[in-house]
Amino acid sequence: MSKIALFPGTFDPFTLGHLDIVNRGLNMFDEVVIAIGVNTGKKHMFSLEQREQWIKEIFENEPRVRVASYEGLTAKYAEQTGAQFILRGLRTNQDFTYEKQIAYVNEDMSPTINSVFLMSHQTNATVSSTIVRDLIQFGGDYEKYLPTSICKAIKR
């Protein structure tokens, strides 16, 4: 049986921190499904289609990465995709506290799905999509936080 991990998030935009977690996840799992959560109550800087396209381009030469979007509960979507694991990156103690609560709820809903937490590499510990969006919006230096292909697309 293949070990499949679901890596959920809004990825608005997909950062080098996200890229690091996926690449390290590929050392642990046979496949990583990058699942872009659709949250209609949240305002996004980039469209779902744009985010999905960017991530697919980044991993176009990696057959063990799938990119999809979903609505609803993450644990239920993990079951639908055949994933046995939910992969999450942690930067801070606050991330751990928040993710631990979600992991317990996911475990209640789907006892066969295990949450796996990876500490972010220290160079990415300060990177968040929220901060990057602010840098983009207000003319800050965002390029050191994003994959080159996404930077080029934003500049266009």
Image (cartoon, rainbow, N blue to C red):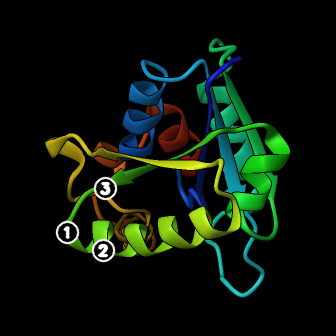
Q: Is residue 65 visible?
A: yes
Q: Nearer the viewer, mark 3 or mark 2?
A: 2
Give left or right: position of 56 versus 153: right
Q: Which mark is residue 90?
A: 3
Q: Secondary structure at mark 2?
A: helix
Specify which label sits upstream in the sequence, 3 or 2.
3
Of residues 31 and 152, the one drawn nearer to the viewer in this rendering: 31
Q: Which mark is residue 93?
A: 1
Task: Locate residue 47: give its quadrant.
Answer: bottom right
Query: How many numbered callouts?
Result: 3
Cα–Cα gap, marks 2 and 1? 6 Å
Label pair 2/1, CB-CB below 8 angstroms = yes
Give left or right: position of 64 versus 73: left
Give left or right: position of 3 versus 93: right
Give the percent coordinates (x, y) of residue 116.
43, 45
Give the percent coordinates (x, y) of residue 25.
45, 29
Three-letter amino acid code of the residue under disc 2 = Thr
Three-letter amino acid code of the residue under disc 3 = Leu
Give the percent coordinates (x, y) of residue 31.
63, 23
> Circle 2: is it few (<14), some (14-19), or many (20+) Cα within 10 Å?
few
Three-letter amino acid code of the residue under disc 1 = Asn
Cα–Cα gap, marks 3 and 2? 10 Å
Q: Which residue is mark 2?
A: 97
- In this view, 71 is above or below 84: below
